[in-house]
Amino acid sequence: MREGLLVRDPLVEAALRGGAKELSPRSVQRRFLRATCLTGAAIRQTERAVELLERGASIVDAVGLAGFVDQAHMTRVLKRLVGQTPGQILRAGRHG
């Protein structure tokens, strides 16, 4: 963070919790993208997929309900952002 490689934006944290009402939606969107390199929609999509899998939805159902293009797309995103494949999340949800 000291070297400017990592960004922590309290506004982004507030937006994730449903706050940040003091700025326009577009300002929040720009700050969110700058801090995370992800859109809010991409994060919500990923959270939705994880939630579905943890609740026991099939991988195919999670792909469609979370709005991914296909299973390979969801797998790449989850591995990159969550560090687990859909199968790993599904198994952990059944045992946890």
Image (cartoon, grey):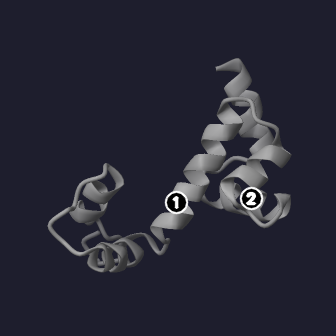
The reply to whether the C-beta atoms of the residues labelled 2 and 1 are less than 8 Å apart is no
* Sequence order check, earlier mark of 2 and 1: 1
Return the residue found at the far left: 22
Q: Nearer the viewer, residue 16 or 78?
A: 16
Picture residue at 68% right of the left edge, 61% below the top: 77
Q: Nearer the viewer, residue 59 or 4?
A: 59
Return the residue found at the far top: 95
Picture residue at 68% right of the left edge, 27% below the top: 93
The quarter holding residue 81 reads bottom right
Q: Amino acid at mark 1?
A: Ile
Q: Secondary structure at mark 2?
A: helix
Picture residue at 59% right of the left edge, 57% below the top: 45
* Count of labels in the image: 2
The quarter holding residue 89 reads top right
Q: Residues within 10 Å of mark 2 (few under 14, many from 20)?
A: many
- Quick one: quadrant of the N terminus? bottom left
Q: Which residue is mark 1?
A: 43
Q: Amino acid at mark 2?
A: Met
Q: Which mark is residue 27?
A: none
Say whether residue 86 is left or right of residue 5.
right
Q: Is residue 66 above or below residue 12?
A: above
Q: Which residue is mark 2?
A: 74
Say whether residue 20 is left or right of residue 41.
left
Give percent across and percent down for residue 53.
Answer: 70, 38
Q: Is residue 74 above or below residue 89?
A: below
- Quick one: quadrant of the C terminus? top right
Q: Is residue 58 above or below residue 93?
A: below
Say whether residue 71 is left or right of residue 45.
right
Q: CA distance from mark 2 to mark 1?
A: 12 Å
Give percent across and percent down for residue 35.
Answer: 36, 72
